[in-house]
């Protein structure tokens, strides 16, 4: 089953803007390489046009088989990129997503639990 990884970030840390922009390019190259190697099945960066741009400026969406995504999240290169991001951008966050066939499975599970609880 596939899962998603949502990596969100806010404004660039004042005085570290150039390094943050270089990190964006390095991170994009890393995920594109992992996509071309078949480790992940989808990668796309996004910038927000509307939002609280101090808190959320953009995000990456990554998808792939659950075991591969979890392995990727344990790779030294990924961990190093994430550590750099915590120093260079505000409001750094990474979240696991339910995607694809996991959506109806999660919905069905929720329906069963609600029925079981009489809700």
Image (cartoon, rainbow, N blue to C red):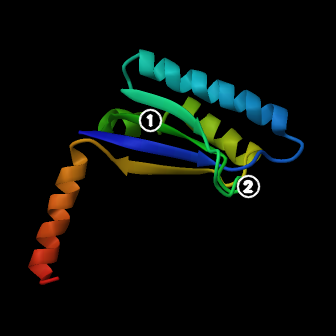
Above-or-below relation of 53 to 28: below
Where 75 falls versus 108 (above or below)? above
> At x 81% / y 47%, what residue is drawn?
13
Q: Residue furthest bottom?
A: 118
The N terminus lies in quadrant: top left
Q: Position of residue 26 (x, y in %)?
A: 65, 25
Q: Which mark is residue 103?
A: none
Q: Residue at x 10, y 76 (%)?
A: 115
Query: What residue is rendered at 31% in x and 44% in y?
Result: 99
SS at mark 1? Answer: strand
Question: Which disc number belongs to residue 54?
Answer: 2
The image shows residue 43, relative to residue 85, as above or below, that is above
For residue 62, the mark is 1
Image side of residue 79 versus residue 12, left or right: left
Left or right: 82 in relation to 103: right
Given contact means CB atoms under 8 Å apart, are the residues at marks 1 and 2 in contact?
A: no
Q: Position of residue 96 (x, y in %)?
A: 41, 49
User: Disc 1 and disc 2: Cα gap in Å?
Assistant: 23 Å
């Amino acid at each position: 089953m596939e899962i998603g990884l949502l990596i969100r970030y806010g404004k660039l840390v004042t005085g570290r803007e150039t390094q943050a922009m270089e990190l964006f390019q390095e991170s994009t190259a890393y995920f594109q390489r992992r996509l071309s190697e078949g480790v992940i099945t989808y990668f796309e960066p996004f910038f927000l046009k509307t939002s609280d741009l101090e808190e959320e400026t953009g995000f990456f969406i990554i998808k792939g088989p659950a075991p591969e995504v979890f392995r990727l999240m344990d790779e030294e290169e990924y961990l190093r990129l994430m550590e750099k991001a915590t120093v260079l951008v505000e409001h750094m966050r990474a979240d696991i997503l339910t995607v694809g066939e996991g959506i109806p499975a999660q919905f069905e599970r929720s329906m069963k639990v609600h029925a079981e609880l009489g809700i």
